[in-house]
Amino acid sequence: MTGAGCPLRVATIITRLEGGAGVLALRGAKALDPAAFAVTIITGSGDRLLGEAAAAGLEVVLEPSLRTPIDPRADRTALRRLGTLLGGRDFGIVHTHTAKAGALGRLAAHRAGVGRIIHTYHGFPFHEFQSPARRGAYVAIERRLGRITDLALCVGTGVAAEAVRRRLVPPQRIRTIGVAVEGAGSGTPGSGLPARGPAARSRARR
């Protein structure tokens, strides 16, 4: 909590609120107790999940410069706008998903002085079919971002093992999660934060 009776502000940043990554990000955001957390979803685009987020009472901010292809001009714009938004809204937690939003969102959050930075690895931007130089550059970037990542959530044991093998984030900061299942009950799928309920609210206030 940011103050007496004030929910902790959480920013969920994802390049596109769609597909499996979008479902996981949205379910994690929806599972948070609204009495303890005020969630804002920041995304470049999306599909029906945008409507689902709004219907759930979540604030949605569209940032069109946040898009998948590497575009230095758009990426600089997105980084600047994310930094302004995060710095001006007193967010206590930033949780990023996917490669582009993960890179720009974590960097912007770090520069804005956000207290806790979480990233979910759904996969990786590097693979064996890339040139060694390109693959090495992506790994180096992820390692640098790992230094400012307080918690890394990995979708599946394979992703977690690769993150450890590549030394992207210190092992003690890595957790394995599964794909969110609607109505799973306990836990907060994909968020790394306490779920709804009195006990969760008590933990969140500590």
Image (cartoon, rainbow, N blue to C red):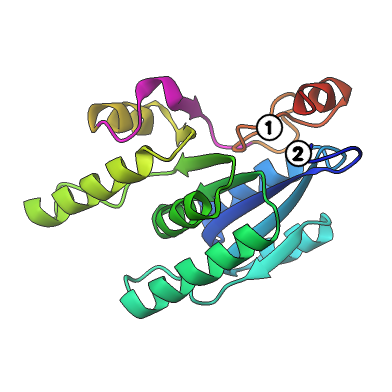
Quarter of image, res 188: top right
Residue closer to the observer: 56 or 8 = 8
Vertical side of 144 occupied by 54: above or below:
below
Q: Is residue 58 left or right of residue 106?
A: right
Q: Amino acid at mark 1?
A: Thr
Q: Which residues are magenta?
A: 167-180
Q: Return the residue at label 1.
A: 188
Residue 47 drawn at (x, y percent): 62, 68
Residue closer to the observer: 166 or 92 = 92
For label 1, the SS is loop
Q: Is residue 138 left or right of residue 90?
A: left
Q: Earlier in the sequence, mark 2 or mark 1?
A: 2
- Name the residue located 14 percent from the left edge and 57 percent from the top edge: 134
Vertical side of 173 occupied by 84: above or below:
below
- Name the residue located 23 percent from the left edge and 51 percent from the top edge: 138
The 10 Å Cα crowd at callout 2, few under 14, some 14 to 19, many 20 or more, is many
Residue 172 drawn at (x, y percent): 42, 20
Quarter of image, res 185: top right
